[in-house]
Image: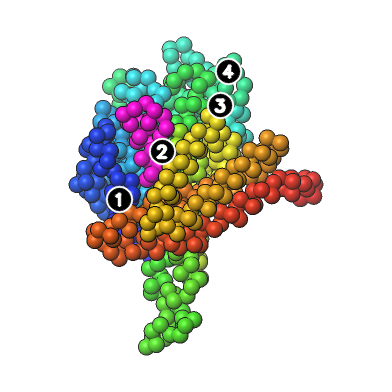
Amino acid sequence: MPTYTPPVADTRFVLDKVLGLHAYANLPRFAAATPDMVDAILEEGGRLCAEQFFPLNQSGDAEGCTRHEDGSVTTPTGFREAYRQLAEGGWIGLGAPEAYGGQGLPHVLSVAFEEYLISSNIAFAMYPGLTQGAIAAILVAGSEEQKALYLPRMVAGDWAGTMNLTEPHCGTDLGLIKTRAEPKGDGSYSITGTKILISAGEHDLADNIVHLVLAKLPGAPGGTKGISLFIVPKFLPDAEGRPGARNAVSCGSIEEKMGIHANSTCVMNYDGATGWLIGEANKGLAAMFVMMNAARLGVGLQGLGIAEIAYQNAVAYAKERRQGRALTGPAEPDKPADTLFVHPDVRRMLMEARAGAEGARALALWGALQVDLARHAPEAAEREAADEMISLVTPVIKGHLTDLGYQIATEAQQVFGGHGYIREYGMEQYVRDARIAMIYEGTNGVQAMDLVGRKLPRQGGKAAMALFALIAADIAEAREGAQAELAVRLEKAVGEVQAALMWLMQHGMKDPNNAGAAAYPLMTLMGIVLIGWMWLKMARAAQKGLDAGEGDRAFLDAKLVTARFYAERILPDAGALRRKLEGGAEAVMALPVEAF
């Protein structure tokens, strides 16, 4: 049976020593995030996840969701009670504005808790996760009346939320959607169409479900320029704002999936359902992208969450399982065999998992801090810079962290050998659950193309240059200290990224397929470098603690060793990735279709 211990000490180290959360106490929301408050949230949130939500993970996966003849859906045993605990504790609204009943705490703190929730039970975490995304979209694009009606109930967890984009004939290419919105003459619209792959589309956890639906108005422009966004609640709110008459939206079926069985992924049928426009007509995609960008960062967090729990269980198994002897001679001659920890290849897999998970945590929390700064920094220029920075790295966080999550889950399963393939040990579920994160909210290939086609060239590469300047400044400082070797290795990897970008500038315009073929290795290359940057920051923070005689020496020593492992064993991949993308598109595109 798997186990889970929230990595509270590591989260606190990143927040306190790497990001310096205390330095932002003068900003809105951060003043309330005192050290005592942060400790309480991490400790209590971690305990709640480990004790209440984690025990439902395997049972929820085995039971799944049940659709009934009336179109209603029942979640697995224990989910309703667990969701009520989450809602009543105020955890759904941790980072939501106080004006709507939220706790008004920094987004970075909400993200720290969300990691624990995902690790403990990813399918369960998706229900409040979709609600938080819908809250973000309504906050940005909703009218004051819509905010007043929906947000307090969603923040409290009484009502849930979803996002409805995909249709049977289109996924990423949203310009092809067929769902129609006809004006009813009273300010509302009649929504008709079918949406598929809708996470948390129907369930029994909340009193109402607020669907955010993309649809087209009569006479709308073609393509994505003609998309509008609508609020379509499961139950129409009555005059007092309570769930009233049932709307004409229903779950047609639950998708049979590889993983995340305990989340109800639905086909949703809209049969003249009543909805209300959010924001401007034909500007719905911009409003939905607020939710999608939040979701993409959240999905990157799913990669981290799965990586962490898979790593923890692989370590526990490797400490107990005895197989073979150390290459240098028996480590424990009085035992019939040594533990798996004596084998370098097992150590390799565990160190890759450790370095990946801890580095991903630092990057995810750094990204969350940029979201906070984009909203609350005192100067407009600071807010703009942070917004540009998080926009640039969002496809990398989503793409690279979910790739890592799946890779780490698979390698953790490998540590178990044959037992990893058996359901009892839990590892096969983590592999199954991790796989979807590379697909939904824009496949990782789409993230790579977004990075190359939109984010890097934006404003003449202004954000990329700012990012490289930050990394260069840290490298310059570190070259004079104990982490000089790590700094040199990181500098070389950054040089590989910059050389790759120069090649792309020279050859991408000449042949757009060169950009398409280079996109994925470039995204991976940037992910490796960004996590390497985080390891430089963590190593410097750990060294500072050791030099001052502060903190847990074993913890800090482990940070330095793991940073060295990342520098020696992962950063060198940057050169191979650059050479791969410089291979161009010719061989990729050469074979005629009929030859496949």
Q: Are marks 4 and 1 in contact (CB under 8 Å)?
A: no
Would you call the spot at circle 1 few (<14 residues within 10 Å), some (14-19), or many (20 or more)?
some
Q: Are marks 1 and 3 in contact (CB under 8 Å)?
A: no
Mark earlier in primary sequence (4, 1): 1
Q: CA distance from mark 2 to mark 3?
A: 21 Å
Span of residues in magenta: 362-387
* Residue bearing the label numbered 2: 130
Nearer mark to the viewer, of 2 and 3: 2
User: Relative to residue 223, is residue 387 depicted above or below?
Assistant: below
In the rendered structure, does residue 382 fall within the stretch colored magenta? yes
Q: Position of residue 486 (x, y in %)?
A: 44, 57
Q: CA distance from mark 4 to mark 1?
A: 52 Å
Nearer mark to the viewer, of 1 and 3: 1
* Residue bearing the label numbered 3: 179
Nearer mark to the viewer, of 4 and 3: 4
Q: Are marks 2 and 1 in contact (CB under 8 Å)?
A: no
Q: Position of residue 218 (x, y in %)?
A: 57, 16
